[in-house]
Image (cartoon, helix red, strand yellow):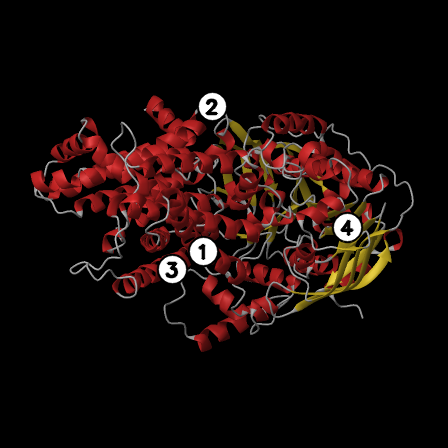
Amino acid sequence: MSKISTAVPVAGRGRGLPLLPRLEAFLIPLMALIAGGVLFSLFLLVQGKSPVEFFSLVWRAGFSTAFSWPNTLSRVSPLLFAGLCVAIPARLGLMVIGGEGAIVLGGLAAAVSGAALGGVPAPLGFAVMVIAAMALGGLWLGIVGALRVRRGVNETIASLLMAYIATALFNHFVESVFRDPASLNKPSTRPLPESLRVGDMPVLQAHWGVAVGVLACLLAWLLIERTTLGFAARVTGDNPRAAQVQGFPVAGLVIGFTALAGALAGLGGFFEVAAVHGTANASLISGVGYTGILVAFLARHNPLAIIPVAVLLAGIEASSGLVQRRMDLPDATILVLQGCVFIIVLLSETIQGRLPAALRSLTRRMSNG
Amino acid sequence: MSAPAPSLEAVGMTMRFGDFTALDNVSLSVPPGSFHALLGENGAGKSTLVKCIMGFYHATSGALLVDYREARIQDPRDAQALGLGMVYQHFTLVPSLSAAENLVISRGDTPALINWAAERARLEAFLAGMPFRVPLDRPVSSLAAGEKQKLEILKQLYLGSRFLILDEPTSVLTPDEADEVLGHVKALTVSGALSVLMISHKFREVRAFADDVTVLRRGALAGRGRVAELTNEDMAAMMMGKAQIGSAPPRTGTPGDAVLELRGARARDRSGFKEIGIEDLKVRAGEIVGVAGISGNGQVELMEVLTGQRRLLSGAMTVQGAPYAATRAQARRHRVRYLPEEPLHNACAPHMSVAENLALRDFDSGRNGTGGRIFLGRARMARRAEELIRSFDIRTRGPQAQIRDLSGGNVQRAALARELSGDVALLVVANPCFGLDFSAARAIRDRLMQARNDGVAVLLISEDLDEILELADRVLVMSDGHITHEARADQAKPAELGRYMAGHAA
């Protein structure tokens, strides 16, 4: 009967379990997360390590105590920006995966402009640094959008290659023209003056990048879900042909949204430099731009959902040190977990829209058997 | 032709999908060597019945008899082993391969290394016994539609099918091509080499070629009989049941000024190697201009030019005298609306709601529309959607349902509701009734005629010649990327138009 079952959801769609389609947006990523965790547990068991110990360590180091939260929150900021950098173009139907490049270049622009602005008042200095970071990040991914519009270049590949170029350029400049002669072992740009360092928020022991990142998520949600521009973008993402027939400025939307994504990634790079490292060096090339892909997919490209997802992944990352020490597992173990979850998330995209039908047929089979 | 044609009987076939009954206790009998037509509206269950016969579906209950023996058909391979073959509405040939290659690879037992000399000899021997043939060595993509359909039929015979199921086999053919292909099929049945079951919408073909007819309505048997003993009215009544087939509203008013003009317009075609060229096309207010043509002769490209999806290489497009490039602002200023074919794929955002899809035209038009310039007016959008759903009779669970969950006719009604609401000067329509059943098509055509009578300039691009002849004031024929013929609709002769469509007339 397998051939017929494909017809069942069509005939039965819309009857019964009316809430499920809405819940689905939450349930599918949750199930993917759990399934990814199970897959990862097998990986641990094969090595003779205890999954129970692993997850309890993650819980303790990432979330459970007053000591764990600052560590977790400090990692949230770049994940928010990197997640938005993937999610915003995704709503237009574009898979931009090279946010890393915009983060790195945004950070470089912030570091160089900030170091050059030694004596200026802090507000002016911050404004210049933010604008430089967002402009360079926006330009970088805006090029990807323009290539897509003008020449039909696949934006996924283009953005990935642009990310490689960006890190190469970054290394080149940090080791040559912008190198601080005082940085001997680790080539870095000149450190930012103290007045141009971003501090921590009151109460929460995390820098302002977290708050700005959350605000960016809220504004991105407003843009996509509540404005006419976002509406046109969603229509374009769902059906580009219909958007063209409606006369939407599809080219402008593509370039604008990719540039916006790049600008937000650049802003993330600004916070990494101004709040964390105080200079631009190889530490900025952390791969967080690629983790942003996982963040966006787990959030199903909903900017509001990016916030909790970023916190979750930040907590897992924050626990990596403790896991390393206690379980004698290498640093890359967390990447294996992320990889397991990501594969399952991509797999679960295929059951999107079919969950109600799948559950119905399951309950039917159970009641029959 | 060695084996004689088999007979086929379906007894009490029932097919349920969940709690939906697609086919309800339908029986059908095709004696050996007969030509049987299966008539019915879309959704009447014709395809379901045929798919049950071919083993694509497993009937919930009922039995199949092939040559008076019960046949258990688990999948299409079983059907083929029993000599049952199907020819689909759309071609299943590999366009880049030649006819000979297509025939040989269609066999399931083709060896990894093909001895072409031996295969060629066997093909020639096979074709020698056939009443018609096709060029064997040209790539299939260069064959005319009629040739391709003949090749599809040859392919089935080559595979040993003695019972052919034809699923609307002439929908992509001109009337002349259709007559030729079906004539050959008919000759094969008369000689006893073949039995045929043909799904059709076209009374003309049923009348000309079929011996018997079975009519389905809403999944159940609605009538059957010998074609010679039935009138078209009898068959229409069986198909429609009690529903009345209205006729088009009367044509009123006279055409006004030209609204749309294309002059010397050239654009690349889809392949990128050829061009389409429209020397002079005018559509005036209060008239319907029909563009007839066989699929793939530049109509898609013309529609893309008109909707701004395809750039003009040269020439001019004007609307109400002003240069027009189909931007949103221009379309709004000149009140231009579009209804592309297959609206779910070309005019809707399938995963967005009915209400959102109904608002695609006016969500950003400020005070007069459903939204402001910057923020969406979601409450106004919902209210407006409910009005349109009521006045255009769109059947949906509600304004918030995804539009892809609606039936084809209702998606088309939603697109039409959106494009025809408000003040319209020019409406460009492509194949508006493709895949719709009688009553849905009737409703859409009435709206188009009404729009015309209200002074809208309508450009109707359609592959359905009957639709054009019914609705249009003037008919243009498009062939090989150009307009090759123009006639007044009330003086046009289908056969003559068909020759221009096929590109044969000079």
Describe the element under mark 3 as helix, strand or loop: helix
Closer to the chain start, of discs 1 and 2, is 2
* Residue B459 tag number: 4
Which residue appears farthest toward the right when viewing the image?
Answer: B254
Describe the element under mark 1 as helix, strand or loop: helix
Label 2 is found on which chain of the structure?
A: A
Let me know if residue B105 appears in the view: yes
Q: Which residue is mark 3?
A: A162
Closer to the chain start, of discs 3 and 1, is 1
A215 left or right, relative to A191:
right
Same chain for labels 1 and 4? Say yes or no. no
Describe the element under mark 2 as helix, strand or loop: loop
For marks 3 and 1, give the CA distance.
11 Å
Expressed as whole percent of the image width and height from the top left, the position of residue A237 reads 51, 45
For marks 1 and 2, give the CA distance.
44 Å
Expressed as whole percent of the image width and height from the top left, the position of residue B181 reads 67, 59
Expressed as whole percent of the image width and height from the top left, the position of residue B272 reads 60, 67
Q: Which residue is mark 1?
A: A139
Same chain for labels 2 and 4? Say yes or no. no
Mark 2: amino acid: Pro
* Residue A18 tag number: 2
Mark 3: amino acid: Met
Count of numbered tags: 4
Which mark's residue is nearer the viewer, 1 or 4? 1
Which mark's residue is nearer the viewer, 3 or 4? 3
